[in-house]
Amino acid sequence: MRRLQDSLLLLVAGLLVLPVLAIVGSWLQWDRVSAQVLGEMAQTVLPAYAATSIALCLVVGAGVALVGGAGAAAVTLFDFPGRRTFEWALLLPLAMPAYVVAYAYTDYLQFSGPLQTWLRSATGLEGRVFPEVRSEGGAAFVFVFTLYPYVYLLARTALVERAGHLMEAARLLGAPLRRRIRSVAFPLARPAVAAGVALALMETLADYGVSSYFGIQTFTAGIYKAWLAMDNRIAAAQLATVLLLLVALLLALERRAQRRLRFVSARGGRAGSAENRPVLLAGGRLALAWMVCGVPVLMGFVLPVLFMLRPLAADWSVLPWDRFVEWAFNSVRLGAISAALAVLLATLLAFSLRRSPDAVTRGVVQLAALGYAVPGAVIVVGLLLPVGWLQETVPQAGLGALVTATVLGVVWAYLVRFVSVALQSLQSGYSRISGSLDDSARVLGATGFGLLARVHWPLLRRSATAAALLVFVDVMKELPATLVLRPFDTDTLAVVAYQLARDERLGEAALPSLALVLVGLIPVVLLSRTLRTPQS
């Protein structure tokens, strides 16, 4: 039984790590042709990809740190009318996929959009009134106001756990408000802000929908161009390696910041202490707090939703209602299958770690859990490389068609990407199960998978349900892997929204986009309930 469990663990880890291994292994095919291709890319497109990606990351990093950190400080350190509402409203942009926000703003603000058309008619101006939305600046704007909740969540948690206690102590020692914020709150929130920025930058580098729609030359867009347009899988794999190294660097920075954050939080006082009284605001400071909290919600959620509702309200007849049910069914079907399999695999990984937390098991689980940090474009290339090699080696087996012409390929990509999401939830559930319970169960004869089925699983059902829900929502919104690996005539809401927007049918793209937003509200509601739960 032990050997069977170990074999299953290695098999699961191998399937989840295969894309990364295939990307790294592409360098083993280095030859004169590969060197020539890479040299040509270094002289032509690589500098543009690197410059654009770095510039975008710098702007987005600074933006999410400012917007998310300021919002967290406002609702944590100060008291003002509407603070309780802003505490959860600042999470709403999490429900908005970045590419959906890009479509909404483009539809409303482009040259032929309603706003510029009205302004030209009202003022007599000619030509473009606003800068082009489809630009690096427009992409940075979209990323900042959809990704700042990563910083907001972590910074708010850090400030809630300790800032109020120390801010009050600093006040009693005579420090003015400005000094208390600069000398107490900012240093406490710095590790959380750094971790949130790293997560936001990983999402920025992994994005394909916004960069492709706006025509921005990023690494992710370059990977798809090298594979699909240039028909050069080795060049695509080598570009994916560069992107993977950047993401690995950000992941290392995020984990370092998380360790510092846990150290700071562990020494904190109780969040519910009577000394933790936020500073009451009035007058100009009150207006500033409303602006700091209201602008991100307005830009990242309210306005995009209103922009998408406009074509729905204008003419319902042009919307593809007959096809919408089919797209929604495909999305729900893929989401349900992936969520069930992700929870199954994550349960196996978490149980193996619980049963034997040795160095080998920990290493295998950590490798399997890296998938969420791997961009979808890298996963696609990493899956298709070995499949292409097998197809060339054993053409009669039809392995290529099995992966690209059925749901197997896209579900495999989803599992590589999102098993780590389910694993985090199940490990959290396991942390609440006492180890003495396992010892008692073994004395009574429950061992191996019997221990999991009869003892652990009844206690893990809530964590497993939350894990399945989170994976389901992530799969519904996922674009890069779905776009390439989906079978023919299996369009999902995310793919259809992208295709309609690319064809300039932005009004029709509003319906599937709004459906994705509604689905995305599910984890936001769960997070809001978690944040409202009093901390002990």
Image (cartoon, rainbow, N blue to C red):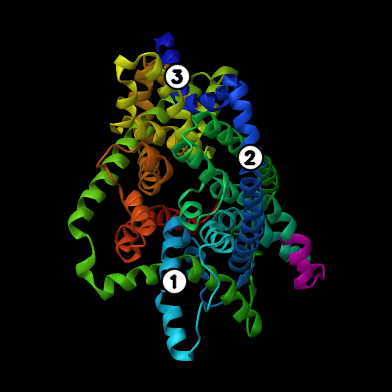
Separation (CA) of disc 1 from disc 2: 33 Å
- Residue at image point 54% right, 48% down: 203
Q: Given this view, does label 1 or label 3 mark the residue nearer the observer?
A: 1
Q: As displayed, is residue 331 above or below residue 156?
A: above
* Few, some or many residues within 10 Å of mark 1 (<14, 14–19, 20+): some
Determine if the magenta segment contains residue 61.
no
Q: Residue 9 has which mark?
A: 3
User: What secondary structure is found at the residue carrying circle 3?
Assistant: helix
- In front of the other: 65 or 136: 136
Q: Which residue is mark 1?
A: 303
In the rendered view, does 77 fall on the left or right side of 365? right
Q: Position of residue 498 (x, y in %)?
A: 37, 53
Q: Earlier in the sequence, mark 1 or mark 3?
A: 3
> Viewer-proximal residue, 326 or 145?
326
User: Secondary structure under badge 2?
Assistant: helix
Q: Position of residue 473 (x, y in %)?
A: 37, 47
What's under tag 1, amino acid-wise? Answer: Leu
